[in-house]
Amino acid sequence: HPTFNWLVMSTAYWGDSEGLVPLYQVPPIFSIREQISEEQRLIVKDEDSSIIWSGQTPSFTLSYNGETTGCLTYDSTETEIEDALNSIHKLCASQGHCISVTRHEDSIIAPNGYVFMLYFNGDSVAN
């Protein structure tokens, strides 16, 4: 018989089941492809959105050696940031896919935003 760890949810459960429902905590899994790696942190925060954005969706671009990504919204997914960075030819020229990205919330260092961890692999570390 499996052993369950009970979790306390901060928001309501919107499923169809009533009563006790076993939940499984599964950590996010990703791999860094090369032994040589570097990580950088990208912080997207908005301490007072009413002044800066006036109701519009906050967005940004990322640049490297004269190449710039398309516009990314502040709440872009890990995959969207990863795809945008991997499309910068000067950054990932020989590999095609040289950056992995994770995203998490941190209300202290990134109020109303996200912290993206960028993991550079292989040849991109030398850049």
Image (cartoon, grey):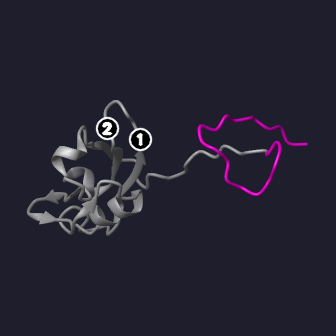
Magenta region, residue range: 1-21
Quadrant where the N terminus sits is top right
49 is higher (above) or lower (below) than 79: above
Q: Residues within 10 Å of mark 1 (few under 14, many from 20)?
A: some
Residue 77 image-quadrant placement: bottom left
Q: What element carries label 1?
A: loop
Most distant residue in the top direction: 108
Q: Residue at x 8, y 63 (%)?
A: 66
Instruction: Identify which residue, 27 or 123, lies in the foreground.
Output: 27
- Magenta highlight: main SS: loop
Residue 4 sits inside the magenta stretch: yes
Query: At which x and y percent is residue 46?
Result: 25, 42
Q: Which residue is drawn at 19% across and 57% down?
A: 62
Residue 43 image-quadrant placement: top left
Query: At which x and y percent is residue 9?
Result: 64, 38
Residue under numbered circle 1: 105
Most distant residue in the right direction: 1
Instruction: Say the numbered circle drawn on residue 110.
Output: 2
Type of residue at label 1?
Answer: Glu
Query: At which x and y percent is residue 95?
Result: 32, 67
Direction from residue 77 to residue 59 in the image, left or right: left
Direction from residue 74 to residue 26 in the image, left or right: right
Q: Residue at x 35, y 47 (%)?
A: 116
Marks 1/2 in contact by CB < 8 Å: the verdict is yes
Q: Which residue is drawn at 17% across and 44% down?
A: 51
Residue 73 image-quadrant placement: bottom left
Query: Which mark sits nearer the N-terminus, 1 or 2?
Result: 1
